[in-house]
Amino acid sequence: MPNWQNVRADFPVLHQQVNGKPLVYLDNAATAQKPRSVIAALVHYYEHDNSNVHRGLHALSMRATNNYEGARTRIAQFINAADPAEIIFTRGTTESINIVARSWGQAHLKPGDVVLTTEMEHHSNLVPWQQAAKASGATLKYVPVLGANAEGGLDLAALDQLLTPAVKLFAFTHISNTLGTINPVKELCRRARAVGAITVIDAAQSIGHGPLDVRDIDCDFLAFSGHKMCGPTGIGVLYGRRALLDKLAPDETGGGMVVTVDYAGATWKPAPERFEAGTPNVADAIALGAACDYLDTLDRAEIAKHDIALAQLAYQKLSALPGIRLLGPTGERSGLVSFSFPDVHAHDVVTFADEDGLALRGGHHCNQPLMRKLGLTSTTRASFYIYNRDEEIDVLVASLQRIIKFFGVT
Ligand code: C6P
């Protein structure tokens, strides 16, 4: 089992005071902090290897290419993809989902088809499907969430009615960034496959928080961002089954992704190059490989236990506070807790908490339709990661007690 106290020492940013108080960083669902090894990988690349990839025959370019492709192989291994060619580097989850929505959507969707998603999706796994449906004449449908506080998760009985052969694609999140719900992704993929639908998983909130095996889940596409798993911002991954990727036309075209070009047209390289037009984000891809190494030194099954235990403790302690409304599952949940107080805006909560050195997130969390369904405009969210400790939950509770007193919440 990892020594969680040592983990904190790996993250330079944590060792600072905010408003005269020790920083308590509980905004990990927005972005995770970076360990020294990831920062060192970035510095090393720029100090020693910086060069363009796939183009040069000189030493630096070959080193950069080897390290860039090495990172692809490392990430394939991290999610147990069958082939590194199934790993496409993108800017993040949002771009990854947009590539599928545009490339796959354009090629396959037609009027009468259904794209299925869920009521708990982040805008990044919702708006691209709205756009794809509009462009093709397909219909977008949503699997409902159950319960006044969405505590019941996805309505799996309604899924029986919704998953008809008209459904060509089913896109869903692995973990809700607002509710903390962990969806049964393997089951959802199995049920989608039974009607011939392809599956797209938004793994933004799960990738850094536990083991993830695309072959075991048996999904067709999966998207995630490096910055939520200790990697840099500006880099992410689209995983796609090779057989599907090689049949897809690229969404973006230009240098690096073509075999031949003449004045009449061009032919495409196979995946992954086909989807990586232009100079890629070499440094951040390499540092994402270093983030995989880092997380594996901690054991991802242990990370899952650690983050879930913190969220459960927080849920239990917060539920004792007057007036609080807790959202999402009452039982097993991922490493975050979302809540609201009557007549206190989440932005006020976050501003007060900041005075106590706490970093929380307040807002709609890019989940506007879900917020509306729950009769809310915003929630406050505390999200936990490998370097958080039980004592930090006490700081959170004390800060919320101060807020409750100030606003006279009963
Ligand atoms: N959620 C949050 O604070 P990008 O921005 O592309 O790295 O990730 C988008 C995204 C997609 N899906 C889910 C489930 C997400 O949580 C996010 C990002 C952040 O909750 C920023 S809104």
Image (tube, grey):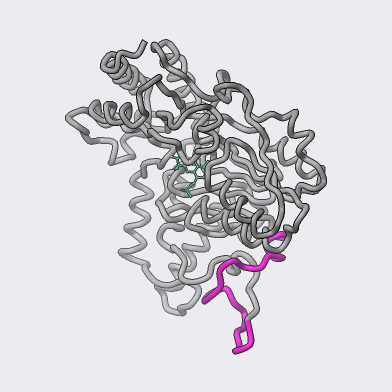
Rendered location of residue 172, percent (x, y): 63, 41
Q: Residue at x 58, y 66 (%)?
A: 275
Magenta highlight range: 242-265
Hey, which quadrant is residue 216 in on the image? top right
Observer able to see residue 78: no
Q: Residue at x 59, y 47 (%)?
A: 79
Q: Is residue 318 left or right of residue 299?
A: left
Q: Is residue 375 left or right of residue 395?
A: right
Q: Is residue 351 left or right of residue 234?
A: left
Rendered location of residue 280, percent (x, y): 47, 66
**Quadrant of the image containing the C terminus:** top left
Rendered location of residue 139, percent (x, y): 71, 49
Q: Is residue 266 left or right of residue 334?
A: right
Please say whether residue 251 is one of the residues in the magenta stretch: yes
Residue farthest toward the bottom in the current orientation of the protein: 263
Q: Residue at x 39, y 71 (%)?
A: 51
Q: Residue at x 76, y 38 (%)?
A: 162
- Between 358 and 235, the residue placed more toward the observer is 358
Observer able to see residue 288: yes
- Between 2 and 122, the residue placed more toward the observer is 122
